[in-house]
Amino acid sequence: MGTGARGGGRGGDRSGGGCQPGLPGPPLAHRRARRVPARSAVGGGGGDRPPVVPDPASPAWGEGEDGRVSGGSGGRVDGLFVYPVKGLSPQPLSGVELKPRRAFPFDRLFALARPDGAYEPGLGHGIAKTNYYVLVDQARLAGLETHLDGESGVLAASVRGRRVLSADLTTDAGRGDAAAFFARVLDLPDGVAPVVAREEGRRFTDMAPDSDRAMEFVSLINLASVGDLARRAGTDVDPLRFRGNVHLAGLSPWEELVLVGREFTLGGVRLRGTSVTDRCAATEVRPGTGARDLPVPRLLATHYGHTFMGVYAEVLDGGHLQPGDALEVGEIAA
């Protein structure tokens, strides 16, 4: 099998209220991914020598030191994605309007809560993802192709091109149909079903337990870092394993880590990098198959000595974002 990352423009959490119109993008199966070849490590490396991973606190961005990054020249948006239901498949976006200190519209607005977990209707704070049915322990969810229509609120699910669910999540009946369907998919005991969770003004992101501010962060994935991992692992690695909102192309491997603590722009949107993204067993699941086939956290730890892939960022100034928009990096934020 050839090595390389699979990426390309195909694609969240927060909405002001109810389901809103304007969630573009056909189901993922209707969009083909572009294959991105694996690249050499930062600094040229050669062989299996680990790359020089930039220190997010270092002022060396753009200094041209051996093994250092070069300032994001050529970096650009390659793809945009939203995840309307936590744990289910992505929907690609041709563009998105972002607002200050808000995540992608429609991102992680719904979740499949465990009936014996900490979630209950009216919950006003974030709780751990272990309270939901998610890929970290429910790989079979990745075998579904799902799509939420932003205008109607209808969630559709298909398996190998055959429609198996159409449920209006804005109604009690529709949420009941969805809960019954996912109970069968998850092979839950009789009488046990997930709770289709939706809370006004909240998102079910992994960062939500940290704070309401962190709940609104967007996630960015550097395709070159995924490609470098693919080369070292000797297998294809689909960037969609990492469930990011923004895929970046044109950077060196691990160059995205230098965004942490810095302000930067993507097109007309100004952001601040907030933290690296630590990876869990959810990334072991191959998108679109439900197969847990690649020990991603272990591979990251083995080859790099950390389990990071991607960074979080906070939107400071909103605007329109679309594939092709350039990355420009500023100074370390105070």
Image (tube, rainbow, N blue to C red):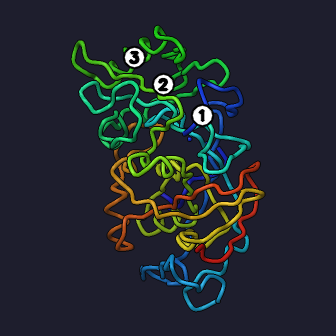
Residue drawn at the location 31% of the way across and 62% of the way down:
298
The mark that comes first in sequence, 3 or 1, is 1
Q: Residue at x 24, y 12 (%)?
A: 191
Q: Residue at x 49, y 80 (%)?
A: 55
Quickly name the residue at label 2: 159
Pointer 1 and pointer 2: residues touching (CB < 8 Å)? no
Mark number for residue 15?
1
Q: Nearer the viewer, mark 2 or mark 3?
A: 3
**Image side of residue 174 versus residue 31, left or right:** left
Q: Amino acid at mark 1?
A: Ser
Q: What label sits on residue 284 in the rendered view?
A: none
Q: Position of residue 65 (x, y in %)?
A: 59, 91
Q: Quadrant of residue 86?
A: top left
User: Residue 291: image x %, image y %?
Assistant: 37, 41
Q: Which residue is mark 3?
A: 181
- Between 279 and 48, the residue placed more toward the observer is 279
Q: Are marks 2 and 3 in contact (CB under 8 Å)?
A: no
